Amino acid sequence: MSDSSRKRADEFLTISGQFKLGALVTEASHPVTANLSDVAKQDIAAALKLLFDVDADVIRKYREFAESGRAGEIKETVLRSLKNGGRIFFTGCGATGRLSILLDSVWRDFWRQQRAANSTFAPPRRGEGGHATRDRERGSFPAALASEYENRTFSVMAGGDYALIKSVEGFEDFSAFGRKQLRDLGVRAGDVVFAITEGGETSFVIGTAWEGVDAGARVYFVYNNPDKILCRHVERSREIIEDKRIEKINLTTGPMAIAGSTRMQATSIQLCVLLTILEMVARELVGTARCAVRSSQRADPTVVPEQFLAKLEELHATLKSPELLAQLARLVALEESIYRAGHKVNYFADRLGIDVLTDTTERSPTFCTPPFRKADDATAAESWAFLFLPQKETPAAWRYLLQRQPRCLAWNAMEVRELVGEDKLSQTFATIRKIRQAELMQFKIGLDGLKLRPPVKGDSAIGITSGAFHPDQLDAAQKMGAQTAVLNFCSSRRQSAPSSKSAIRNSDESRTRDESRCPQSEMVMVPVPETDFLLDGVTRVAVKLVMNALSTCTMVRLGRVMGNFMVWVVPSNLKLIDRATRYIAQLTGLTYERANHLLFEVLEYVEPRMKSDQAYPPVVGLAVLRARNKLTNEEVENELMK
């Protein structure tokens, strides 16, 4: 073991008490999926059903929240803030950071549609307090209202928008970074902050919560572990939970379908709850205005939680139907075959682009797949999957995806020095330079990026849509010999709630239309319950549940999960270093300390490739086989690559 790796291990062990999270419920193994890897080898549809079975925990927790009446209370707080000129902030890191950006995008997209629907739009005139005023000569109130509220939500992700694609090393481990990112957006008294952390212990998010409190904002701490466990094991969490100035929204569902993979049920319940609150607020705001919505969408906002619950239950039943499971299993088999053959998948999406991007980019830290590759990086490994939007140029595609201009960090050296001190200035500032907006634009998600990643024989192109689908890109991919598929989240168009079999049958007409457009494509129709929700929240939940299940099952089939433990996890922050250490200890019988020293020794071996986005062997797997078989790093890697 080198001196440098020993020093890094000892430094972590010195502070490891703050990051030993094995006692948390979100880190536990779920009994339903304990044998997931064995089941997936034999029956893909059965494995998918197990993943959806765990989503029943989300429905159960949502029912508790809906019946508690808290949604109405929170809605009133948000509504009061907006009407008085306040703003709404969603903060998070990793999966919750992507969730915060999704919520921001959904809110902005709704008001942008309302603005476009009013041909009499004129920019609003500001009255007292900066509010939009009714001025018949300047334009209709609905258009002014849309313009007023469109830009009232803000997302704060650890590392900025760049982190949508790739996690920024070290950012989620420091509360000072969270404080500064929120402070840079000018949080103030009268604003509302939703600080969202799956585990309830993330330092960055906790920093945003404290910054909101200090600024006089109303702060909601949204998390997914029991208070008693957090308070007993994590001091920074206890301080937040016991502070009466902060409202707590505890959404504990239980263990994740994949142990520790909080991108699944933890963020699913957070998505459901926060979309419910935003839906209620939007209904209240359009209630008396002449907005382009149906009368049913102006209904009493207090009925939203009950309606959302009913639609979630209907959706969940549909997802577990044998007919749909068989269709989804074919998509898993398709992607698995593509990756096993060393080929790539191009996703094409429009309105659901942010949803697809979220799932696609989360695969890299969870399953150690190559992250999205930049256009100017010829040495990084080819990304297994990539996303393209219909905009011709990448800058326009990013604006469409986010529903705003991208916001990347551009801190100067003085600002960074104040955060980390002189010792870490050089390393941290070098990181900041790599995550600026110019670097984000190197991820060519517009059609101008296709020339860098053209589909060839053996590849796959998959369109993901929630309505009419334009098959031009799939047609082009087919002509190049690529396999194609369409995943359509279509409305079930029914008045009552029939069985899931009826839902599948009701999608036949949509299937026929799409098959006529792309006759050689695999067609999968996911019937989504018909709703009058302004923000179409149930569709967003459906996309998340299905994409999570598909990508997870594919990775399980590829051997990246053992039982329901993600043994290919990338230890890119202190929480994940703890998780990787625990896995090594469990699988080898080593003490926590010895397992951690072995982990850092292996990290030193693979880090040059990790940092240059080149392919590298699984850190946990390498360490486990080294310990078990008394081999060198090189010998184990040769065995793994056979």
Image: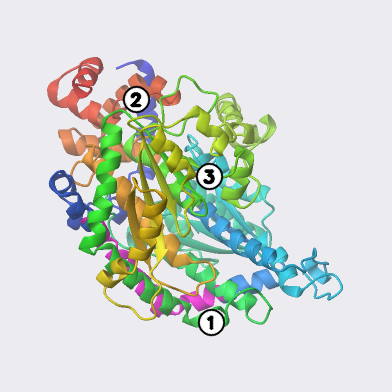
Q: Residues within 10 Å of mark 2 (few under 14, many from 20)?
A: many
Q: Amino acid at mark 2?
A: Leu
Q: Is residue 61 magenta?
A: yes
Residue indicated by mark 3 = 389
Left or right, 47 with respect to 576, comes to left
Left or right, 570 with respect to 395, comes to left
Residue indicated by mark 2 = 603
Q: Looking at the image, is 191 positioned above or below residue 157?
A: below
SS assignment for the magenta stretch, majority: helix
Q: Which mark is in front, 1 or 2?
A: 1
Tell me which numbered mark, 3 or 2, is placed earlier along the sequence.
Answer: 3
Q: Amino acid at mark 1?
A: Ser
Tell me which numbered mark, 1 or 2, is placed earlier along the sequence.
Answer: 1
Q: In the depicted view, which residue is nearer to us: 505 or 344?
A: 505
Q: Which mark is in front, 3 or 2?
A: 3
Q: Amino acid at mark 3?
A: Leu
Cα separation between marks 3 and 2: 36 Å
Q: Looking at the image, is 520 positioned above or below residue 70?
A: above
Residue indicated by mark 1 = 296
Residue 98 image offset from top left, x and y in percent: 49, 49
Residue 129 image offset from top left, x and y in percent: 79, 69
Cα separation between marks 1 and 2: 57 Å
Instruction: Name the image quarter holding the N terminus.
Output: top left
Query: What element does badge 1 sit on?
Result: helix
Q: Residues within 10 Å of mark 3 (few under 14, many from 20)?
A: many
Instruction: Name the image quarter holding the C terminus.
Output: top left
> Which residue is at a point 41% across and 20% down the rendered structure image?
608
Where are the magenta residues, as a range?
Answer: 50-75
